[in-house]
Image: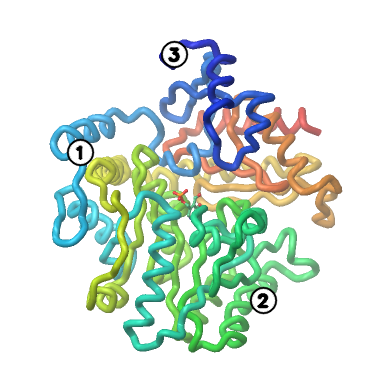
Amino acid sequence: MNKITNHMPTAELQAIDAAHHMHPFTANDELAKHGARVITRADGVTLTDSEGEQILDAMAGLWCVNIGYGRDELAEVAARQMKELPYYNTFFMSTHVPAIALAQKLAELAPGDLNHVFFASGGSEANDTNIRLVRRYWDLMGKPDKKVIISRKNAYHGTSMGSASLGGMQGMHAQGGMPIPDIVHIGQPYWYLEGGDMSPEEFGLMRARELEQKIDELGEGRVAAFIAEPIQGAGGVIIPPDSYWPEVRRICAERDILFIADEVITGFGRTGEWFGSQHYDLSPDIMTVAKGLSSGYAPIGGSLVSDKVAAVIGREEFTHGYTYSGHPVAAAVALENLRILEEERIVDHVRDEAAPYLAEKWHQLADHPFVGETTIVGMMASLALTADKSVRKPFKASPGTVGYMTRERCFGNNLIMRHVADRMIVAPPLVMTKSDIDTLFERAVKSLDEAY
Ligand code: PLP
């Protein structure tokens, strides 16, 4: 059998890939027909493929490569840690220095009293942990009937049975008996498509109050928690109206429920603050983190837990954990990533420089005849492709057709932009310069012009 290398002809790599590799969120038959693009290298904000094409990655991989590609420091830390202690677990009464140091650093960076961390390998596992944490909390509080977790339609919280059930993606629920029991979904604060004649502010309040109505309908004695992304990411970068979060905050404060902020995308600088909870002044009891925690250089995630919840959970053995909880190499890489974010003042760069410039350019795209709203917070932005923007009318083609076409044009023009139905999304590496943003804008305009 041939050794597979970067130097093999692309078609050969694609054929072997299609024959043996089942891709996430992909119809494998399509791979056999068209072949996947083979990415061979990356540096800064640019990917290189097997044909030598240079592609601007305006999605930071999967919203995760916050510090950009090709940082040698992380590779060096990983190699050093692998030689010193490649693996040990943190079960029972063992621990190790990378996990200790990362837990302390996260407690320092996280808002409020989120001073404790339960490590996982990514966001899905961390959200599974959260389901168990909140139910266990209420058991230990003597309220075992409080089991229901309220989430939102079109939310994305991962792909395991638990986390996909927390998520509100119809297409995922349809493929495997989800949601699991005791998870319910309320509406999302998506004014552009669902707001009708209401003002954004009225609509935001209405959607926030669905939480209160759902708690009343179920009975407060049955509700364990509300989970939400500060900004829905994979759902289409749905930036809520300004009225939404203050009202949710009021409801959570008045009701005896826990609030889980899923910051897998919004964490580690994406919004121009360290965490989206700071952008919206939220005080979660539990926060999910992953992705930007290591900038994607190693698989790691976790649940940041408040003093209040940790004190109760700590009373007895919590029968939960993953082989790779706090993996020493991933933890060391994450710690080095946080050092870079901090020392290079990357969050300040987002807030003061990159995000305002990206916003200026992004809003110019609204001049295009088929672009309805353009929205952005920090370095996450979306736009609605719209048949008639005067009345926010979607295209007649089945949802996603137009978005898919646009994404393909972007891909052809060496720009990675993602689509969710007919919304186009970017979430670039946070280290983007103004000149990178100019390139992004030029390629986006060209792609939109070619698509319509
Ligand atoms: N939560 C949110 C908000 C996400 O966007 C994602 C992934 O995109 C997840 C959870 C799941 O994370 P992972 O893919 O690391 O399991």
Q: Residues within 10 Å of mark 3 (few under 14, many from 20)?
A: few
Mark 1 belongs to which amino acid? Pro
Foreground of the two, 90 or 359: 90
Q: Please, what secondary structure does the residue beneath circle 1 have?
A: loop
Circle 3/circle 1 CB separation < 8 Å: no
Q: Which mark is residue 13?
A: none
Please give the residue where the numbered disc 2 appears in the rendered image.
206
Q: Residue at x 29, y 49 (%)?
A: 324
Q: Residue at x 59, y 62 (%)?
A: 178
Q: Are marks 2 and 1 in contact (CB under 8 Å)?
A: no
Above or below 105: residue 415: above
Left or right of residue 375, residue 223 in this image:
left
What x and y, as percent, mark residue 402?
Answer: 77, 40
Judging from the image, what secondary structure is the residue with disc 3 in? loop
Residue 436 in view here: yes
Mark 1 sits on what residue?
86
Q: Amino acid at mark 3?
A: Met
The crowd level at tag 2 (other Cα within 10 Å; few <14, some 14-19, many 20+) is: some
Query: Would residue 401 appear left or right of 427 to someone viewing this image?
Result: right
Ligand 1 is within 8 Å of the C-beta of the residue at disc 1 = no
**Residues packed near mark 1 inside 10 Å, few (<14), some (14 to 19) or many (20 plus):** some
Instruction: Quote the CA–CA distance across marks 3 and 1.
Output: 30 Å
Res 12 → quadrant: top right
- Can you say which quadrant of the picture contains the C terminus? top right
Q: Residue furthest front?
A: 1
**In this figure, which residue is indicated by the disc labeled 3?**
1
